[in-house]
Amino acid sequence: MPPQKLERPARDDEHAFYYLDNVHVTSVGVDIGSATAQLMFSEVHLQRQAQGLSSRFVVVDRNVLWRSEVRLTPYRPDGLIDADLIADFVEDCYRAAGIHRREVDGGAVILTGEALKRRNARPLAEAVAAGTGEFVCVSAGHHLEAMLTAQGSGSVDLSATTGKALLCVDIGGGTTKLSLLRDGEVAVTAAIELGARMVSFDAARAPIEANPVLATIGIDPVELGARALIDEETESACAAALTRRMLAVARRRPEEIEAALLLTGPLPSELLEFEAITFAGGVSEYIYGREARAFGDLGQAIGAAVRAAIADGSLGAEVLDPGEGIRATVAGASQCAVQVSGSTVAVSADADLPLRNVPVVHPATDLQGALDAGMIAAAIRRAVTAHGVEGAVALAFSFSGPPSYARLRALADGIGAGLGDDTSVPAVVMLDSDIGASLGQILGEEVGMKRPVICLDNLELKPFDFVDIGRPMLPSGVFPIVIKSLLFGSTT
């Protein structure tokens, strides 16, 4: 797939106050996967909601500015990712797109599947991010990748327009991700450790690698690796064994997936509540008939097996095409990784931004009705202790009910008491409602918190592990936020 450049969309920015209510984010996504690597630049248009005097900014448009070709992920002879070739690839992409790093407002470098298991995965991703833009973040995690792929494939939009509950099955090189989508929202995700690169071979069909995970499903990886050739019969048999498990949820037979393959724990029963199925990832190009070439792995054979299952009606629902396949993750990373806070926020002058990789904790406290500062403080201490966090944390709260002074003061007192007197790290508070400025003012001026205060609101608070917070974007005053997960292996 060759690189593609699109024209930057026209803006209705003649009005003097346009940029007070509109934010245009130039974002980059870099996807380094088990089999392929690619990059995409996008422009995301966010606009302040008009209803309810809210300061929340929501995405109203996403446009691809430039997309790279899809390249095979380069590995060194010792099995590590070739950092030099990845750096050259990213540099070539910026040059070809005609985009300078200072023009990039944010984005994400995502490592997926087998690529994130390599010993140099994390330092490689951090180096790529540092050389890609000031606020380009590193992320790797199965739940996050599933969410981004569901977004980038078009499955989320398809669930919104059709009103159907969709199961998105993302078959990549090292993993298969599952997402249940309802009404344009990702409801639940999961991942299993099977993908098209479980077996790889050269042009002469001599084996290159057989993943040890194959032993879990009764295939001897040592015997496969010792063969002179991977013949078509063996390729088909391996693909059939993998496909049966990859489609187990789509066939409503989750018990056919061995527990050892479940990367995200037991499969949620909600995954079975779908009305239609979409596919994403590299293998989906074969499923939807957009690719016919072979790339020395099981992708083509798995695609054929899935197409056969669709034809014989053995899946649990109709199959829809969401639009994007192999580019789904990079599209999600480029277009959906960055949120912006509302403009009614509080960030003290001594807060040193950007902040990166701040662990997020969700204190188990109900912020409805009358609030008890002591109970809030105890919940914060329990949450921080349970996570074993040292240093800065981001406290995520869902606040409902009237933002009266008494309720906000109780919340502020609870935060102050729960975090204690350490002045070396900032107090980071993330809220889903429009109270950031008021709460931050009470924390700084009345509670007398000595540490820097960063109080951000109007954020979508879903399960996540870490947050990055960038410098304010003027003139709107919003702060770019990346909510993400970090999960790097160190086994090979």
Image: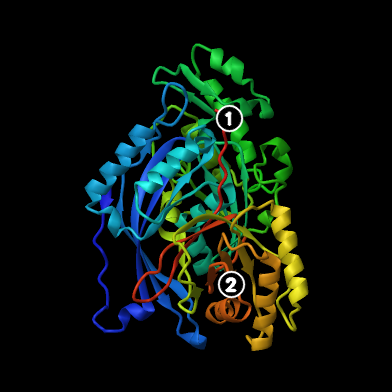
Q: Position of residue 244 (x, y in %)?
A: 63, 37
Regarding residue 308, the answer to whether it shows in the image is no
Q: Secondary structure at mark 2?
A: strand
Residue positioned 27% across, 74% down in the render: 11
Residue positioned 65% across, 42% down in the render: 263
Give the labeled residue for mark 1: 491
Vertical placement of residue 64 versus 121, above or below: below
Give the labeled residue for mark 2: 431
The residue nearer to you, when weighing 43 against 405, is 405
Q: Label 1, label 2: how many angstroms apart (C-alpha)?
A: 37 Å
The residue nearer to you, when weighing 301 against 189, is 189
Disc 2 marks which amino acid? Leu
Q: Quadrant of the N terminus?
A: top left
Q: Report the side of 122 relative to 253 (left or right).
A: left
Residue positioned 50% across, 40% down in the render: 172
Vertical placement of residue 299 versus 463, above or below: above
Q: Report the side of 396 relative to 20 (left or right).
A: right
Vertical placement of residue 228 versus 391, above or below: above
Disc 1 marks which amino acid? Thr
Q: Position of residue 306 (x, y in %)?
A: 54, 40
Q: Position of residue 203 (x, y in %)?
A: 39, 21
Mark 1 and mark 2 lie on one chain; the one further toward the N terminus is 2
